[in-house]
Image: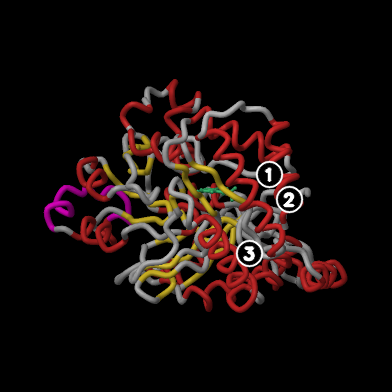
């Protein structure tokens, strides 16, 4: 078997959309980006959507838009991909890391304790597609005592008059919260369309706006589109039309627009997402849960509750009693059986940059605990039932080899698998 971890979904409809873009001879930001923004708007029910060239640049943009700068603080979880913290650092502000709950997501009580007069924003991360506790987080930012602490120093800050709640929804397009798209919960929700995500544009991202009164979402959309294009008041498409050559630069923007050639990939995928790609992911997650249900060491990832439903971006299972070293061995053994698995995530305080900045993993015991025995299994629409069955059997035997502390040789794993093959 050769089972990759997360290959992109590329079928004929994706190829056709990309070819259509090439044949139309308009490859940078234009009609495909517009169409993708419309599709995202309609599946999320958010007010406006701006496509950009990555989640990271989208987060930098929104922090800058809000006026986040040196001396400010942004509260984030210690357990996420580093881009969450890097976006804050790029604005000159300080990422204030807090610990997580058992469900991998930011702990609202820890957020509460971390709020100071310098706090400008909170970035909550929906790990694996599981929405954060947005009820608690929204209560917190609108709590009068917390609001009184907020110091507004920019035009947008004085319109909002409170901490900005951003969702790092890099994993969570299609997730639900109170039976509605989770993207409606925060002021700003940012998706990633990097190659490994549920929907991809090779590289890309989308910013969904849900700004409350008195923000004018349409005006913010136009402003943000200019912001993604060097602050230029006219995009390439309108400039290219006869007589449309004159333009102005209105302010210092960024250059982070999404090209049409990339949007085409995501456009074909998103049109299949809710009725095809997402249900296939869910089916695989359920097959895993079913396959591991009799293993007393199996800790299932959070997938559904009365209030929330994941979009099954990752399957971050955990193994009770497994040490970090044993977990790493399981991953190596799975690899030699042809199965690529992964770990989401190494807590940021364990990475060099953040260690050098003074963050310490000892301050985030839950993050370490969830990381140490976590294994992310392959989950994507192209996986077959037989492959998932093979992964389940392989994980069970590789984990048992570790937990029974038997001779840890890969030969033994192969023997177990030969036996399984004969038996089935
Ligand atoms: C992938 C990812 C990002 C970064 O997305 P890019 O589009 O690559 O910038 C940010 N946060 C999380 C949690 C991610 O997994």
Viewer-nearest of labels 2 and 3? 2
Q: Main secondary structure of the magenta part?
A: helix
Specify start and end residues of the magenta stretch as a single range: 144-157
**Which residue is farthest left?**
145
**Which of the labelled discs sits on residue 340, or is there none?**
1
Q: Is residue 230 above or below residue 269?
A: above
Sequence-first disc among 1 and 2: 2
Distance between the alpha carbons at the discs numbered 3 and 1 = 45 Å
Q: Which label number is shown at residue 234? A: 3
Q: Which quarter of the figure has residue 76?
A: top left
Magenta stretch contains residue 406: no
- In the image, residue 393 sits, relative to residue 175, either above or below, namely above
Which residue is drawn at the image coordinates 53% and 34% (left, top)?
327
Q: Position of residue 397 (x, y in %)?
A: 61, 43
Q: Which numbered disc covers residue 62?
A: none
Q: Quadrant of the C terminus?
A: bottom right
Label ID, residue 3: 2
Badges 1 and 2: C-beta atoms under 8 Å apart? yes
* Residue 64 located left or right of residue 365: right
- Residue at x 37% of width, y 43% of height: 77
> How is colour applied across the structure in the image?
secondary structure
The answer to if 153 sits in the magenta stretch is yes
């Amino acid at each position: 078997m050769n089972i990759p971890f997360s290959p992109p979904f590329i079928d004929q409809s994706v190829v056709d959309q990309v070819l259509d873009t090439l044949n139309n001879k308009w490859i940078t930001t234009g009609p495909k980006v517009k169409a993708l923004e419309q599709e995202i708007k309609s599946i999320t029910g958010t007010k406006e959507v701006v496509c950009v060239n990555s989640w990271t640049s989208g987060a930098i943009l929104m922090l800058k838009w809000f006026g986040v700068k040196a001396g400010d603080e942004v509260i984030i979880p210690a357990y996420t991909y580093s881009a969450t913290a890097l976006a804050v650092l790029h604005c000159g502000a300080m990422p204030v890391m807090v610990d997580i709950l058992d469900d991998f997501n930011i702990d609202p009580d820890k957020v509460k304790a971390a709020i100071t007069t310098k706090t400008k924003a909170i970035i909550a991360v929906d790990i694996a597609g599981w929405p954060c506790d947005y009820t608690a987080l929204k209560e917190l930012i609108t709590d009068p005592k917390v609001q009184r602490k907020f110091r507004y120093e920019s035009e947008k800050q004085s319109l909002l008059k409170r901490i900005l709640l951003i969702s790092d929804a890099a994993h969570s397009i299609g997730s639900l919260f109170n039976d509605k798209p989770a993207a409606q919960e925060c002021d700003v929700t940012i998706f990633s369309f990097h190659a490994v995500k549920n929907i991809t544009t090779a590289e890309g991202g989308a910013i969904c706006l849900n700004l409350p009164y008195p923000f004018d979402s349409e005006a913010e959309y136009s402003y943000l589109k200019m912001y993604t294009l060097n602050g230029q008041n006219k995009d390439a498409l309108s400039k290219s039309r006869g007589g449309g050559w004159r333009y102005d630069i209105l302010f210092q923007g960024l250059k982070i627009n999404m090209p049409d050639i990339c949007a085409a990939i995501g456009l074909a995928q998103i049109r299949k997402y809710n009725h095809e790609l997402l249900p296939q992911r869910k089916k695989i997650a359920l097959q895993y849960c079913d396959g591991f249900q009799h293993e007393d060491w199996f800790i299932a990832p959070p997938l559904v509750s009365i209030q929330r439903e994941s979009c099954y971006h990752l399957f971050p299972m955990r193994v009770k009693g497994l040490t970090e070293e044993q977990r790493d061995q399981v991953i190596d053994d799975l690899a030699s059986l042809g199965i690529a698995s992964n770990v989401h995530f190494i807590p940021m305080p364990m990475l060099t940059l953040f260690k050098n900045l003074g963050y310490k993993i000892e301050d985030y015991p839950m993050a370490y605990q969830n990381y140490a025995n976590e294994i992310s299994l392959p989950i994507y629409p192209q996986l077959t039932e037989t492959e998932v069955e093979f992964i389940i059997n392989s994980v069970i035997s590789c984990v048992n080899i570790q937990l029974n502390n038997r001779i840890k040789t890969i030969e033994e794993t192969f023997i177990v698998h030969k036996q399984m093959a004969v038996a089935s």
